[in-house]
Amino acid sequence: MQQCLGKMEGLRMAKSTCCRASAPKRVAGVRVNRRSCHIVASAVATKTVKIGTRGSPLALAQAYLTRDLLKKNFPELNEEGALEIVIIKTTGDKILNQPLADIGGKGLFTKEIDDALLGGKIDIAVHSMKDVPTYLPEGTILPCNLPREDVRDVFISPTAKDLSELPAGAVVGSASLRRQAQILAKYPHLKVENFRGNVQTRLRKLNEGACSATLLALAGLKRLDMTAHITKILSIEEMLPAVSQGAIGIACRTQDDASRKLLAALNHEETRIAVVCERAFLAALDGSCRTPIAGYAHKGSDGQLHFSGLVATPDGKQMMRTSRVASFTDADAVKAGEDAGRELKATGPKELFMY
């Protein structure tokens, strides 16, 4: 649902709260006011690089990974006080009882962090790339992707070894319309119900009997060292991933040369080019918050960029797929993604884009 590009208008956003995060669970309240970046001095000038992140266990794991990579690449950042993690609670973290499509989409997980970045409260912002809208706020840039983790989804169930073993009427818990559409396309006898919360919350709900099974991203479970919960890893063919799944992106202010230098050392170019292709596909489709979209690009053994994408109705009854092979360059990756998106939008039934 990261395809909800600009659906934030009309939604009254809660003000962000930030805190120092010397320990993952310590959250205090300091208001972040939105300011234009040109009137606020960068925190880098104080010789403390402030890393902004959401406060979920997975988000913090990604922030700590970023911190450790900065220390590894820049020895001077190993000094006490050189790095600080700042937790920012987003509206998407606060509203857990509604589907994301009903409250404004994936921008809900980035808006307050963007405001903190532009307001000079943080110097870099660590995101799960599948949460990042295809536009970036003016004054920010996202020049860095860390090496991508495994993009596949996993099936987790206390009673079945595979989706095919679930009986008619069994409930699969998932907040993802992408997963819902692909599940129902193959197993129309199953039910998919909204199932939100962090990884730990979803696993707890599953164990309490809220549903018969759930699907999660393998990348998150690996970063949290929670792969023991996996029943089965689903192949790309079984479940095409979300655009940018498994990728971490790090943003900074456009004019912040010090932060851009830090992020240049961390960037993994192969991941960045693949993500660029997938996000170009998503932008070209311009689907609504309720349009199931999946896309995956990677560098093949032939050195070429290989892309697969799909768009579907939420009930899985209509689904269109496309693919591209292109040179593994920035420009060709963008072109491949855009062409694939335009193809599906031009040839697909209009009802695919009415949700």
Image (cartoon, rainbow, N blue to C red):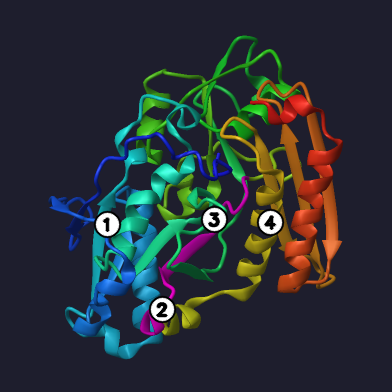
Whether 129 is drawn above or below 251: the answer is: above
- Secondary structure of the residue carrying tag 3 is loop
In whole angstroms, how far apart are the C-alphas of marks 4 and 1? Answer: 29 Å
- Mark 1 crowdedness (10 Å alpha carbons): few <14, some 14-19, many ≥20: some
What's the amino acid at mark 1?
Answer: Arg
| Res. 255 mark | 2
Residue 110 horizontal side relative to residue 282, left or right: left
Q: Which residue is mark 3?
A: 135
Spot occupied by residue 37 in the image (x, y as percentages of width and height): 32, 69
Whether 191 is drawn above or below 300: the answer is: above
What's the amino acid at mark 2?
Answer: Gln
| Res. 34 mark | 1
- Secondary structure of the residue carrying tag 4 is helix
- Position of the N terminus, as image quadrant, is top right
Number of marks: 4
In the rendered structure, which disc, 4 or 1, sits on the residue that comes first in sequence? 1
